[in-house]
Image (cartoon, grey):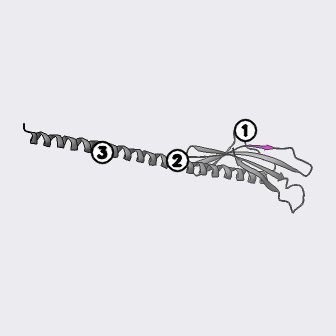
Amino acid sequence: MNIQNRKKTTNGFVALIGAIIISAILLSLSLSASAEQFSARFDALDSESKQNSLALAKSCAHVALLRIAENFSYAPVSSGDVLSVGDETCMIFSITYSSENTAHEKTADILTRGIWNSTWSTWETKAVIRDPAFPHDTSLPNMSVQSEKEM
């Protein structure tokens, strides 16, 4: 074998190995970038599910306030009142009342939970409720929310 043929064979081998190495590097960079985007997509989806579950929990708290306005002594069943919103649900877990004072008002501590796509949020609302059956200063509302927060 002469030197000319051997040099051509070596050049082809070096070019082939170089192409394989460059392809492997580009493939690993591409897979790394796509895995990062895949993860970011699910993070965004989880964030959206959390926002929706929180909105459901807040809505349930508003339903609880409406039920208290309709019935001054409203309390959910011991296992909680489940409300359906389409395919999703929220629950009024509990309502704890402070003792009623002489102005016929009490403080309600309402605990609710919203569930959306297997993601849940718990919401606490504290409100002062005045008994509509008793006369009181009409400049004051029958109900006022004192605080709301995610648990």
Q: Position of residue 68 (x, y in %)?
A: 77, 51
Element under disc 2: helix
Question: Would you say 64 lies left or right of 14 here?
Answer: right
Name the residue that disc number 3 marks: 22
Q: Position of residue 42 (x, y in %)?
A: 50, 47
Judged by depth in the image, the label closer to the viewer, 1 or 2, is 2
Element under disc 3: helix
Q: Amino acid at mark 2?
A: Asp
Examine the structure image and report whether residue 54 is included in the region drawn in magenta.
Answer: no
Q: Which mark is residue 78?
A: 1
Nearest to N terminus: mark 1 or mark 3? 3
Residue at 80 percent across and 55 percent down: it is: 144
Distance in Å between CA atoms under marks 1 and 2: 35 Å
Which stretch did the figure color magenta?
91-103
Q: Which mark is residue 43?
A: 2
Judged by depth in the image, the label closer to the viewer, 1 or 3, is 3
Residue at 90 percent across and 60 percent down: it is: 137
Q: Position of residue 10 (x, y in %)?
A: 17, 40
